[in-house]
Image (cartoon, rainbow, N blue to C red):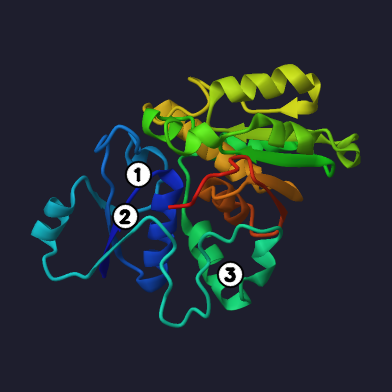
Amino acid sequence: MIICEAIGGLNNRIRCLVSTMRMSDEVKLVWTVKETNVWLWCGFEDLFENNIEVFRSKVDCLRKYPKLPVYSSFEFIKLPNDSMNINHLDYDNWGNDIPNNIKESVLTQVNNLRPIKYIRDFVKEYESNFDDDTITFSIRTWKDAERNISSNGRFFDINKVFGEMDKSKYAQSRFFVTCDHQDTFDEILDRYGDKIIYTPKRTFFGDYKTVEGIQDSVVDLLLGGKNKLIINSKHSSYCDMQWWFGGAKADIKIIDTNPGMRYA
């Protein structure tokens, strides 16, 4: 039995949780809500049905379980027997370099996460829109929150996306687009029209402040990895987790949508 203190945004938290699930069959989860103005504003139980005891604060968790070890991270945790760190692999088809024993262990726990019925049903129905020529474009702009806009978001260059989408080898393909910023998505949709596939949002792209917005983001998270190719933004944990939730099968192409950005 161990404590998982999952930190950061949605996918950072999932990476930490998956890691602790690799360590123990019984995990106590610290999942804060509205702790800062840029993190996640919904509970774990709003997204997943797993039978995990969840605490809103580390203090409350340690009060009940003072002797349990605490694992706190926003990344995949490198276990003692892991032969490599699987975080921040920012090159094409990086998944091919992950050893099978690590890949199988992570996938087992990713597959053990059970999304709520709304998300499961939506994904099951919507994936029929994909065919062998559908390509996922997973675009991370870092324009989803004020703090991000003034830091990483200022480096975003939509022409990097257009340059990839305009390549002749994709002429017969349709693009399933996931994005963290409504205005950016609108620019893409206006330019490519019916070539774009997307899930309707109950709020807007990049909404991390409502349960509905974050649930819709999880829908896109689960759908994005179901296509044979994911073209994604460098440095994005969301893009990475789409690959894992898709069964770690898709080919991966990285585009540097935020040139000049340094990963912190």
Q: Callout 3: few (<14), some (14-19), or many (20+) C-alpha neighbours within 10 Å? A: some
Among the 4 quarters of the image, the one containing residue 53: bottom left
Assign a secondary structure to mark 3: helix
Residue 135 visible somewhere in the drawing: yes
Image coords of residue 41 (percent x, y): 33, 33
Q: At x 30% / y 32%, what residue is drawn? A: 37
Among the 4 quarters of the image, the one containing residue 9: top left
Among the 4 quarters of the image, the one containing residue 94: bottom right
Task: Left or right? Give the position of 82 relative to 157.
Answer: left
Q: At x 49% / y 50%, what residue is drawn? A: 262
Q: Callout 1: few (<14), some (14-19), or many (20+) C-alpha neighbours within 10 Å? A: many
Circle number at residue 255: none
Image coords of residue 142 (percent x, y): 49, 36
Q: Are marks 2 and 1 in contact (CB under 8 Å)?
A: yes
- Amino acid found under the numbered disc labelled 1: Phe
Q: Earlier in the sequence, mark 2 or mark 1?
A: 1
- Amino acid found under the numbered disc labelled 3: Lys
Most foreground residue, 13 or 185: 185
Q: At x 66% / y 28%, what residue is drawn? A: 198
Residue under label 3: 103
Q: Residue furthest left?
A: 63
Cα distance in 3D space between marks 2 and 1: 9 Å
Is 49 placed above or below 21 here? above
Cα distance in 3D space between marks 3 and 2: 23 Å
Cα distance in 3D space between marks 1 and 3: 24 Å
Residue under label 1: 44
- Amino acid found under the numbered disc labelled 2: Ile
Most foreground residue, 202 or 238: 238
Assign a secondary structure to mark 1: helix
Q: Are marks 1 and 3 in contact (CB under 8 Å)?
A: no
Circle number at residue 52: 2
